[in-house]
Image (cartoon, rainbow, N blue to C red):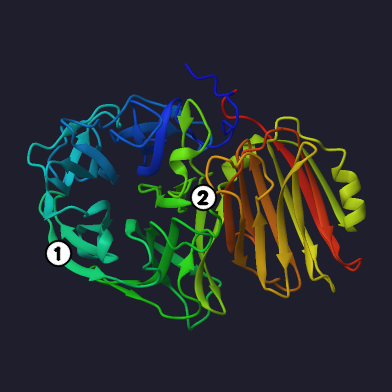
Amino acid sequence: MSSYREPWRPQFHFTPERNWMNDPNGLTFLDGEYHLFFQHNPAGDEWGHMSWGHAVSRDLVHWQQLALALAETGGEMVFSGCVVADAENTAGFGDGGGTTLVAIYTANSPEPQLQSQCLAYSLDRGRTWSRYPGNPVLDLGERNFRDPKVFWHEPTRRWVMIVSWPERRTVRFYSSPNLKHWAHLSDFGPAGSTTGIWECPDLIPLPVEGAGEVDGGQRWVLVVSVGSGAPSGGSGCQYFVGDFDGVRFAEDRSGRVPLWLDYGRDFYAAASWSGILDSDGRRLCVGWMSNWDYAREVPTSPWRGAMTVPRELTLRSTRDGPRLFQQPVPEIRSLRTDSRRWQDLTTEAATERLATLMKADGLAGIAVDFIPGDAKQFGVRIRHGDSEETTITCDLPAGELALDRSRSGVSWFAPAFPGIHRAPIEPVDGRLRLEVLCDASSVEVFANDGEIVMTDLIFPRDKRLTFEVFGDSADLRLESIEVWSIDSIWR
């Protein structure tokens, strides 16, 4: 059994007890439980024998790993997909005893290699699953056709599926009255970033916050993961804002393209939860915290792979049009301890206070509101021990935020791992806010209330963690600064 105390084991991010994990799958909420299924190799810590692992939580913070949900069968691997609650029993799998969960997943057949969309269902809140005898329900006879995301479209009273056509840099839309019989509606793409293959699509309706008469109302956000070509290199998640009329998605073309959910190196296959109650109303997502450039080589054991913290998505009006903002779900605040807060400090005074707050286990968060004045460069250093650091720098003349992990710790396992990752940034009303979450092997940065997000893995040799703030002008002021410890979810 794992102790969940191994070197670099995340302490407030989900990881499987053992073995390989990649994409989040089947995110749904039912009867007080958040379900997280995930791509999993039950036989080892390398990619292979892909099956669906399963974990549940009642608070998006503490997770219980359950038995394997959908296992590889006869060499046919279970690739990514989704789960919906079929409350009206449209598929006919229900027995009248409660809501049926239906998984829609890609079956990857080895000989010949074909990918098709299949169904499985559960009558006991996801604890056990039965495959539909009529599988597959959607088959084009193609080698690469995968990652279905299904939702109920109330205006047309039918299910809608989005599925990726990876090598064509296209997503396809289908509809069905019963999850079993699917009719093609339309295609979207190529568009945005097309360097890498397209995977793991999602389509999310969101109201536009702070919108005037021009924006107004609701937009649909189409999320597409790309296998390469992300802004910091390798794999990442782009998104498009537009309208969906039940048949086709029409992109709004305004501002900078492509748009990215995360500018760090380690955020992929993001997916949103279905079934969130209207009384809650949030749109929640999580991503796989790694990159295909080196995911198979990261030096962790007996597990390999972690999820980001769950995030709340909002769509806000900006001068470039509606844009996604992300924040850690507020439930994460339940793990905060020993919080300290100061106001109106110089960088020297702030660094003096921070030097006394060493975190022996490396689990901490910091939020800083910078008033730049005439400062050109400023930011936060995350120091581990005496010789390792990760630096977050706001460079105003360059208009960018840089996350430098080149001296963050162990990086020998992959030439692509060390480096500096950059994102566009500028102050808002003369102020720039950084919030940073540090776990045993990760840094997540939320800038300007989540307008820009950067996620990077790090592997420090020394757990001891301290923060510093810095700037190149005495005119730089810290309107506020808060630092807190974070409890482990595995205690």
Q: Can residue 96 be seen?
A: no
Res. 266 mark: 2
In the image, farthest residue toward the left:
134
Residue found 64% across the figure and 69% down from its top: 425
Q: How far from the left and from the top, in percent, is residue 284? A: 46, 50
Mark 2: amino acid: Asp
User: Label 1 crowding class (10 Å Cα cut-off): few <14, some 14-19, many 20+?
Assistant: few
Look at the numbered discs 1 and 2 and tell me whether their residues touch, using CB distance below 8 Å. no
- The correct choice, above or below, for 244 with respect to 227 in the image is below
Does dot 2 land on a helix, a strand or a loop?
A: loop
Q: CA distance from mark 1 to mark 2?
A: 34 Å
The answer to whether residue 175 is left or right of residue 21 is left
Q: Of discs 1 and 2, which sits in the foreground?
A: 2
Q: Quarter of the image holding residue 160?
A: bottom left
Q: How far from the left and from the top, in percent, is residue 177? A: 14, 55
Q: Can residue 439 be seen?
A: yes
**Which residue is disc 1 drawn over?**
184
- The correct choice, above or below, for 254 with respect to 292 in the image is below
Mark 1: amino acid: His
Is 393 or 34 nearer to us in this picture? 393
Q: Quarter of the image holding residue 102?
A: top left
In the image, farthest residue toward the bottom:
214
Residue found 17% across the figure and 40% down from its top: 110
The answer to whether residue 402 is left or right of residue 207 is right
The answer to whether residue 182 is left or right of residue 308 is left
